C-alpha cells in the first residue's frame, strides 16, 4: 500500500521450482530412481536472495496508479519493471532443457543438477519474452516460438534452427492488441495463432482499468499461416469468443486445419476485479454447474475447430461434456502437428476446488478423438461427452500436477506409453509419483513411487530423455 493505492500479487506469480525424477540403470542393469528439486535462479531471484527479502513491488493487479508506480519504481531500482517468473513450463530443444514463462526469455537448466545456467536469447537474436509452449516442427526439428509484449509489436513469431543456435525467421504478426497467447500451435506446414480476448493493456491501466482483463464481448479469431510466412500470409478465422490457454493438437485434413484445445467461457487469470473477495470469486466458479451456458464458470471442455482453408468457413464443437472439467492437455509428442487418435488431460475435482478456492485435479482423462459417441437426447446432450472418454480417478483427496505422456521406445502404437504425474495425498500428507498405463487407463497405476518430501501443486511437466553426448 502507498499514497497511490494498493497493488497485490496475482495467483500465477511466484518463484519457479523444478522437481525432477530420474530413471536410470545401475552397473547391474537394475532400474534406479532418484529425486531432486531446485529453484530456477533467474536474475531477479538471485537479487532477492542476496537481499534476503522480497524486493519487487507487485505490478500485475491493483489500483491503476499503484501498478504504474510499481512499474516505475521497480525499473528505477533494478532496471526491470517486474519480477522474472520462470514458473510455468519446461521444454527441451537440441538436447538442452529450458524453463519458461510468458514474461521473459527462457532460462537454460542443467538437466542433472537443475542448476540455472544462462538466459536463452538464441545468440542475441530473440530479445523479448517467449511462450511457455513452443512447438517442435515434425520432420525438421525446428522450434516455433512466439513472444508477446505490452507495446507494439504485440506478438512476434520466430522459427529457431534444429541445433538451437540460429533464429531462422522472425515476423511481427501485426496484432492490434496484446493477447495473452499462452501457446502456439503447429501443423506439418502451418503455424496456428490463437488471438482471443484475454489481453494485457498498459493504456487500459492509464485509463483506470486492470492490466490483464478477459472481455467475453470482444472478438476471438484463429490465424493460420505458412511456417515462414509474413503477417499478410495469415488467414484469420472468426470464432466464438472464449478463453483458451492450452492447445491439445493441430493437424491438416483435406482442406481443413483442425485445432483442438481446452476451452472455458470465463478466465481464471487474473482473477476478480481488484477489491472483490478472491476466495468467494474463485470458489463460485469452480463449482459443478447445472447449466452449460453459465458464463461465470471455469468449466473447461475439450473443444474442436475445423478451419476450411478454401472457403474460410469454421465448424466448432465441444468434444467433451459438462460433467468433467479438463485442462493441461497432453499427447504423444511424436504426433504434434499430425493427426492423432488420443489425447490426455487432468480432470478437476469441482468440490475440492471450490472448497479451497484453487484448482485441484483429482484424476486423468483419455480422449478417444476418432470415436464419436451416439447422439443423446437434448436434455442430456450438454452434459455428455461427444467422443469416447476413459477416466482414471485418484484416491480421495489426492490431486496431481506436472503430468506428462511418456512413449514406449521403438515403433509402437500411439497410446503405447504411460502418463507419469506427481500427486499429493492430503489425507496422509505424502507425495508420490503415479505411473499409469495409457492402454489400460482406468486400471490401477502400474507403479507408485514414494517421494521423500512434499511436492507442491504446480503447472506443467515434461519427459526429457537424457543423452550424455548433447547435455
Image (cartoon, grey):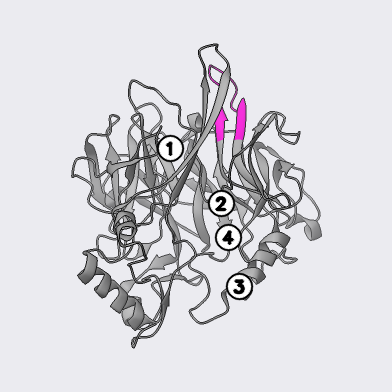
Q: Residues within 10 Å of mark 4 (few under 14, many from 20)?
A: many
Toward the viewer: 413 or 441?
441
Of marks 3 and 4, the one in the foreground: 3
Q: Quarter holding the N terminus?
A: bottom left
Question: Which residue occupies 53% across, 51% down?
Answer: 458
Q: Position of residue 452 (x, y in %)?
A: 59, 40
Quadrant of the frame with the C terminus = top left
**Reading the chain from its start, which is encountered first: label 3 or label 1?**
1
For label 3, the residue is 279
Q: Earlier in the sequence, mark 3 or mark 4?
A: 4
SS at mark 1? Answer: loop
Q: Nearer the viewer, residue 201 or 81?
A: 81
Q: Earlier in the sequence, mark 2 or mark 4?
A: 4
Magenta segment boundaries in residue numbering: 405-419
Instruction: Please say whether residue 228 is visible from this viewpoint.
Output: no
Q: Which numbered dot is residue 264?
A: 4
**Is residue 359 visible to the viewer in this orientation of the structure?**
yes
Closer to viewer: mark 3 or mark 1: 3
Q: Quadrant of residue 369?
A: top right
Q: Nearer the viewer, mark 1 or mark 2?
A: 2
Asked whether 418 falls inside the magenta stretch, the response is yes
Q: CA distance from mark 2 to mark 4?
A: 25 Å
Disc 2 residue crowd, few under 14, some 14–19, many 20+, Cα 10 Å: some
The main secondary structure of the magenta stretch is loop
Residue 374 position by quadrant: top right
Q: Which mark is residue 456?
A: 2
Amino acid at each position: 500500500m502507498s499514497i497511490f493505492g494498493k497493488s497485490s500479487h496475482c495467483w500465477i506469480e511466484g518463484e519457479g521450482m523444478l522437481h525432477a525424477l530420474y530413471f536410470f540403470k545401475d552397473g547391474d542393469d537394475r532400474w534406479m530412481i532418484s529425486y531432486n528439486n531446485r529453484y530456477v535462479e533467474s536474475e531477479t531471484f538471485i537479487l532477492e536472495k542476496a537481499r534476503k527479502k522480497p524486493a519487487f513491488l507487485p505490478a500485475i493487479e491493483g489500483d491503476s496508479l499503484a501498478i504504474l508506480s510499481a512499474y516505475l519504481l521497480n525499473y528505477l531500482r533494478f532496471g526491470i519493471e517486474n519480477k522474472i517468473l520462470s514458473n510455468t513450463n519446461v521444454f527441451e530443444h537440441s538436447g538442452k532443457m529450458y524453463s519458461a514463462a510468458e514474461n521473459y526469455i527462457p532460462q537454460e537448466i542443467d538437466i542433472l543438477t537443475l542448476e540455472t545456467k544462462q538466459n536463452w536469447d538464441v545468440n542475441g537474436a530473440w530479445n523479448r519474452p517467449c511462450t511457455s509452449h513452443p512447438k517442435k516442427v515434425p520432420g525438421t526439428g525446428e522450434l516455433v516460438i512466439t513472444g508477446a509484449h505490452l507495446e507494439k509489436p504485440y506478438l512476434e513469431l520466430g522459427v529457431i534452427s534444429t541445433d538451437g543456435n540460429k533464429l531462422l525467421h522472425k515476423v511481427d504478426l501485426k496484432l492490434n492488441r496484446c493477447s495473452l497467447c499462452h501457446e502456439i500451435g503447429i501443423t506439418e506446414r502451418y503455424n496456428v495463432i490463437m488471438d482471443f480476448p484475454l489481453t494485457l493493456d498498459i493504456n487500459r491501466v492509464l485509463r483506470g482499468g486492470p492490466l490483464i482483463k478477459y472481455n467475453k464481448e470482444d472478438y476471438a479469431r484463429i490465424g493460420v499461416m505458412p511456417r515462414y510466412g509474413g503477417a499478410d500470409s495469415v488467414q484469420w478465422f472468426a470464432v466464438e469468443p472464449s478463453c483458451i490457454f492450452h492447445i491439445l493438437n493441430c493437424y491438416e485434413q483435406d482442406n481443413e486445419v483442425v485445432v483442438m484445445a481446452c476451452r472455458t467461457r470465463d478466465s481464471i487469470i487474473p482473477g476478480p476485479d481488484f477489491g472483490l473477495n478472491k476466495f468467494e470469486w474463485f470458489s463460485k466458479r469452480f463449482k459443478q454447474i447445472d447449466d452449460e451456458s453459465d458464463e461465470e464458470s471455469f468449466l473447461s471442455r475439450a473443444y474442436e475447430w475445423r478451419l476450411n482453408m478454401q472457403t474460410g468457413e469454421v465448424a466448432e464443437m465441444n468434444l467433451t461434456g459438462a460433467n468433467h472439467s479438463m485442462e493441461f492437455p497432453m499427447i504423444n509428442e511424436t504426433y504434434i502437428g499430425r493427426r492423432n487418435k488420443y489425447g490426455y488431460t487432468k480432470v478437476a475435482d469441482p468440490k475440492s476446488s471450490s472448497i479451497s478456492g484453487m484448482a485441484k485435479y483429482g484424476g486423468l482423462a483419455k480422449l478417444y478423438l476418432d470415436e464419436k459417441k451416439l447422439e443423446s437426447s437434448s436434455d442430456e446432450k450438454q452434459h455428455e461427452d461427444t467422443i469416447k472418454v476413459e477416466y482414471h480417478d485418484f484416491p480421495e483427496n489426492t490431486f496431481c500436477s506436472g503430468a506428462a505422456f511418456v512413449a514406449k521406445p521403438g515403433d509402437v502404437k500411439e497410446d503405447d506409453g504411460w502418463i507419469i504425474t506427481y500427486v499429493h495425498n492430503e489425507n496422509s500428507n505424502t507425495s508420490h509419483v503415479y505411473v499409469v498405463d495409457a492402454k489400460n487407463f482406468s486400471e490401477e497405476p502400474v507403479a507408485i513411487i514414494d517421494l521423500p518430501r512434499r511436492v507442491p501443486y504446480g503447472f506443467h511437466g515434461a519427459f526429457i530423455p537424457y543423452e550424455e553426448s548433447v547435455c
